[in-house]
């Protein structure tokens, strides 16, 4: 597939019945990029996976007043209609538009309201059950304060902040968390997320063999969670390198990815 590759991950869990499986497609950091007219190449690739659900880990658009959000909006609407259901967690670009209304006015609602009307579940510090093929999981979206995306530093995040935003976990079902910034994987796992889906770091922009990604949007060198699958005990994190670029419009040894996740039950 020209322009991006498909990366698949297989995760087994005893929280699903043995022999049952769910397939999810994950997108992040598209930043309004289009693959083919109206993103037809990307839509075709998502549909080919025959997903049970589409999970978005934020930054589908560019959160400023100079860029139209229509490419991202049209794509999400098409995915909901043709490959859905879609579950959408906000990234820092969506959060910026939602919070800073003195700058962006009503742009966030203009972007999100048609998605909600079409049935897209926009998860801003909330969770919802997902059921398909006799399987039940929970999908949550954690929208952190913009201060956690600051440049040249890393603000500590306490597990209590997730409990305040999302509540205590009461279900023993498998828990999927859409959390745009992967830096805080330890806190997400401590809260109870079995699988966290993140993006934000764009794979480290430039990748060096054996060293990984070079720099983050916060200007930190060699991030630990740059792209791929990571584990803390039985808790997993998948970090998307993104489908688009922003500000630094380059990718070196760092291809864009559409991610496919197969969640399989085991005894």
Image (cartoon, rainbow, N blue to C red):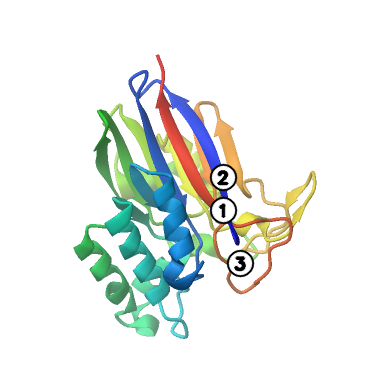
Point 62% across, 63% down: residue: 218
Q: Earlier in the sequence, mark 1 or mark 3?
A: 3
Q: Are marks 1 and 2 in contact (CB under 8 Å)?
A: yes
Kindly identify the residue that appears in the image at 41 percent across and 37 percent down.
Answer: 191
Q: Earlier in the sequence, mark 1 or mark 2?
A: 2
Residue 239: x %, y % from top left: 55, 47
| Mark 3–mark 2 distance (CA, rounded to whole Å) | 29 Å
Residue 245 sits in which quadrant?
A: bottom right
Tally the numbered discs. 3
Q: Residue at x 51, y 59 (%)?
A: 148
124 and 159: which one is in front? 124
Judge from the rendering whether residue 65 lies leftward or rightward of residue 168; answer left or right: right
* Horizontal side, residue 234 vs residue 86: left or right: right
Q: CA distance from mark 1 to mark 3?
A: 25 Å
Compared to residue 157, the image places residue 66 above or below, namely below
Q: Quadrant of the N terminus?
A: bottom right
Checking the image for residue 102, the label placed there is none
Q: Position of residue 265 (x, y in %)?
A: 39, 23
The residue nearer to you, when weighing 166 against 239, is: 239
In the image, residue 193 lies at what x, y percent? 41, 37
Mark 1 sits on what residue? Answer: 257
Q: Residue 7 shows which numbered tag? A: 2
Give the residue pinned by disc 3. 151
Q: Secondary structure at mark 3?
A: loop
Considering only order in the chain, which callout, 2 or 3, is on the residue closer to the N terminus? 2
Q: Residue at x 68, y 56 (%)?
A: 254
Residues packed near mark 2 inside 10 Å, few (<14), some (14 to 19) or many (20 plus): some
Mark 3 neighbour density, 10 Å: few (under 14) some (14–19) many (20 or more) = few
Q: Secondary structure at mark 1?
A: strand
Q: Secondary structure at mark 2?
A: strand
């Amino acid at each position: 597939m020209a322009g991006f590759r498909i990366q698949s991950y297989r995760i087994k869990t005893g929280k699903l019945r043995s022999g049952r499986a769910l397939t999810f497609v994950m997108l992040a950091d598209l930043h309004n990029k289009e693959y083919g007219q109206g993103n037809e190449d990307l839509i075709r690739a998502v549909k080919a996976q025959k997903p049970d659900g589409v999970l978005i880990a934020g930054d589908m658009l560019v959160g400023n007043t100079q860029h139209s959000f229509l490419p991202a909006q049209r794509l999400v609407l098409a995915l909901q209609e043709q490959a859905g259901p879609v579950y959408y967690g906000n990234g820092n670009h969506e959060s910026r538009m939602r919070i800073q209304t003195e700058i962006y006015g009503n742009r966030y609602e203009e972007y999100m309201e048609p998605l909600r009307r079409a049935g897209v579940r926009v998860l801003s510090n909330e969770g919802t059950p997902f059921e398909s093929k006799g399987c039940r999981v929970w999908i949550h979206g954690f929208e952190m304060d913009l201060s956690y995306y600051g440049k040249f530093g890393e603000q500590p995040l306490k597990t209590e902040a997730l409990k305040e935003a999302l509540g205590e976990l009461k279900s023993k079902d498998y828990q999927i968390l859409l959390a745009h910034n992967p830096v805080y994987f330890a806190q997400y796992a401590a809260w109870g997320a079995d699988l966290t889906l993140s993006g934000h770091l764009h794979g480290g922009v430039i990748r060096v063999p054996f060293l990984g990604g070079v720099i983050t949007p916060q200007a930190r060198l060699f991030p630990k969670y740059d792209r791929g699958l990571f584990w803390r005990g039985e808790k997993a994190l998948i970090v998307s390198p993104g489908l688009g670029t922003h500000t630094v419009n380059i990718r070196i040894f760092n291809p864009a990815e559409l991610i496919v996740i197969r969640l399989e039950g085991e005894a």
